[in-house]
Amino acid sequence: MSARDTAQRLRHILVADDDEDDCLLMREAFAERRADSLLGFVHDGEQLLAYLLGTPPYQDRVRYPMPDLILLDLNMPRMDGREALGAIKQHPHLRRIPIVVLTTSSACEDVAGSYQDGANSFVTKPSSFSELAGLVEMLGKYWLELVTLPPSPRTREA
């Protein structure tokens, strides 16, 4: 089996989070519970949109594949997750990508606003690694196994 065949079967998850510690924990949780997934990371809303639109430095789709799922923190610099969510869900070619808001907030206005702007789920970040690993396992089972996702652009190209 070629590396390309393997990469096409793996699900690509893009994590948008500015906290390096949270990103490291997310990487470790996915390695432990969802090794069948490939993770990419961006650290603010502007990077997220550049990645999704394939603008420099993200134009190489082999290196930066379109995600099957986005995990989005709300509180990021430059362009926050709220603004990025709105921009993604208004874009005709990006709105089909499921977005799970994964943030420290549990404020009613953040929950309501996220769903209003098109989030597919809202989850408050757990406080321990074991809870995060369990969350990663649940998210993976639901979003990557149970749900039928729309075909990604890289699947149609193959």
Image (tube, helix red, strand yellow):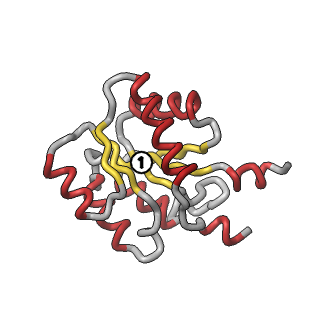
- Residue at 33% x, 30% y is 126
In the picture, residue 5 is in which quadrant? Answer: bottom right
Q: Residues within 10 Å of mark 1 (few under 14, many from 20)?
A: many
Q: Answer left or right for 6 relative to 113.
A: right
In the picture, residue 33 is in which quadrant? Answer: top right
In the picture, residue 39 is in which quadrant? Answer: top right
Q: Residue furthest bottom?
A: 92
Mark 1 residue element? strand
Image quarter (top left, top right, bottom left or bottom right) of the C terminus: bottom right
Front residue of this view, candidates 108 and 12: 108
Q: Answer left or right for 105 relative to 66.
A: left
Q: Residue furthest front?
A: 146
Q: Identity of the amino acid at label 1?
A: Leu
- Residue at 26% x, 45% y is 75
- Residue at 41% x, 48% y is 71
Front residue of this view, candidates 147 and 45: 147
Q: Residue furthest right?
A: 1
Q: Which residue is mark 1?
A: 71
- The total number of labels drawn is 1
121 shown above or below 125: below
Q: Position of residue 146 (x, y in %)?
A: 54, 51
75 shown above or below 8: above
- Residue at 19% x, 50% y is 110
Q: Position of residue 120 (x, y in %)?
A: 36, 57
Q: Position of residue 97 (x, y in %)?
A: 46, 63
Q: Answer left or right for 148 relative to 10.
A: left
